[in-house]
Image: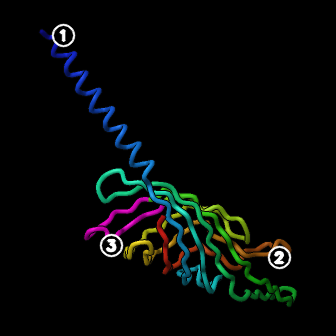
C-alpha cells in the first residue's frame, strides 16, 4: 500500500512539474520584444562633465507570472561632454587646460517589469553592467529603475539611469587629478515600441 501511495505521489508531482515546464516554455516563446529611445539630463557630478544624454535599448521580456515580465536588455547610452577644466600651477606659472570627452556605454542587464491597473502602468528595473566604449570613463554597475504608461504598441517611460564607473581628469605631466566624477547618472524620458 505504501509503495502504491508513493508511486501515485511521484506520478502526480511529475505531471505537475511537466505542465509547469511546458507553461514556462510557452510563455518564453510568446515573449515580447521592446525597442526604446530616450533623452536625459545628467545629474550629480555627471552634470559637471556632461550637458546632455541620449540612448536606446532593446529588451526581450516574457511573462513568468501574471503581470510580471523578466528578460534581458542591451543598449547604448551616450553622455555629451560640456566644456573643459583649467588648472593653474603656481610653481611654474603654467596653465593646464583639458577638454572633457564624451562618454559612451553599452548597458547589458537583466530586466524586469510589473504591470498595474490592467496593464496601463508599469514599474521596472534593469540591473547589470555599463561597459565603457569611448571616453575617459570607467565601466561600472548599471541600474535603471523606470516607470511607464502603456498606450498599446507605444509606451511612455520616465527613468533614472546610474552607471557607477566614474572618471578622473588629470595630467601625467603634472601628476595630479583635477576633476573626479563618481559616476554617470541621468534622469531620462523616452518612448518604447513593443512587438
Q: Nearer the viewer, residue 155 or 47?
A: 155
Q: Which mark is residue 3?
A: 1
Q: Nearer the viewer, residue 143 or 61?
A: 61
Q: How many marks are shown on the rendered structure?
A: 3
Query: Where residue 176 sits in the image (x, y, percent)?
Result: 76, 74
Q: Which of labels 3 and 2 is toward the front? A: 3
Residue at 80% of width from left, 88% of height from top? 90
Labels 2 & 1 near each other (Cβ < 8 A): no
Query: Where residue 182 sits in the image (x, y, percent)?
Result: 59, 72
Q: Residues within 10 Å of mark 2 (few under 14, many from 20)?
A: few
Main secondary structure found in the magenta portion:
strand
Q: Which mark is residue 96?
A: none
Residue at 53% of width from left, 71% of height from top? 36
Q: State which quadrant residue 142 falls in.
A: bottom right
Query: Where residue 19 sits in the image (x, y, percent)?
Result: 31, 36
Task: Quote the CA–CA distance across marks 2 and 1.
Answer: 82 Å
- Name the residue carrying label 2: 174
> Is label 2 in a helix, a strand or a loop?
loop
Mark before the other along the chain sequence, 2 or 1 = 1
Q: Residues within 10 Å of mark 1 (few under 14, many from 20)?
A: few
Task: Quote the CA–CA distance across marks 3 and 2.
Answer: 53 Å
Q: Which residues are magenta?
A: 112-126
Q: Does residue 66 lie above or below 171 as drawn?
A: above
Amino acid at each position: 500500500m505504501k509503495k502504491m501511495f508513493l508511486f501515485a505521489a511521484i506520478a502526480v508531482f511529475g505531471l505537475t512539474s511537466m505542465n509547469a515546464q511546458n507553461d514556462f516554455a510557452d510563455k518564453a516563446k510568446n515573449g515580447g520584444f521592446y525597442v526604446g529611445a530616450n533623452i536625459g539630463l545628467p545629474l550629480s557630478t555627471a552634470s559637471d562633465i556632461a550637458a546632455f544624454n541620449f540612448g536606446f535599448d532593446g529588451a526581450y521580456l516574457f511573462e513568468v507570472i501574471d503581470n510580471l515580465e523578466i528578460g534581458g536588455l542591451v543598449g547604448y547610452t551616450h553622455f555629451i561632454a560640456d566644456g573643459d577644466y583649467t588648472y593653474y600651477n603656481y610653481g611654474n606659472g603654467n596653465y593646464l587646460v583639458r577638454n572633457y570627452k564624451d562618454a559612451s556605454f553599452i548597458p547589458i542587464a537583466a530586466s524586469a517589469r510589473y504591470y498595474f491597473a490592467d496593464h496601463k502602468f508599469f514599474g521596472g528595473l534593469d540591473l547589470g553592467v555599463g561597459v565603457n566604449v569611448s571616453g575617459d570613463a570607467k565601466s561600472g554597475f548599471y541600474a535603471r529603475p523606470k516607470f511607464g504608461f502603456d498606450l498599446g504598441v507605444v509606451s511612455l517611460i520616465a527613468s533614472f539611469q546610474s552607471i557607477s564607473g566614474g572618471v578622473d581628469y588629470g595630467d601625467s605631466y603634472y601628476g595630479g587629478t583635477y576633476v573626479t566624477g563618481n559616476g554617470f547618472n541621468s534622469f531620462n524620458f523616452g518612448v518604447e515600441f513593443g512587438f
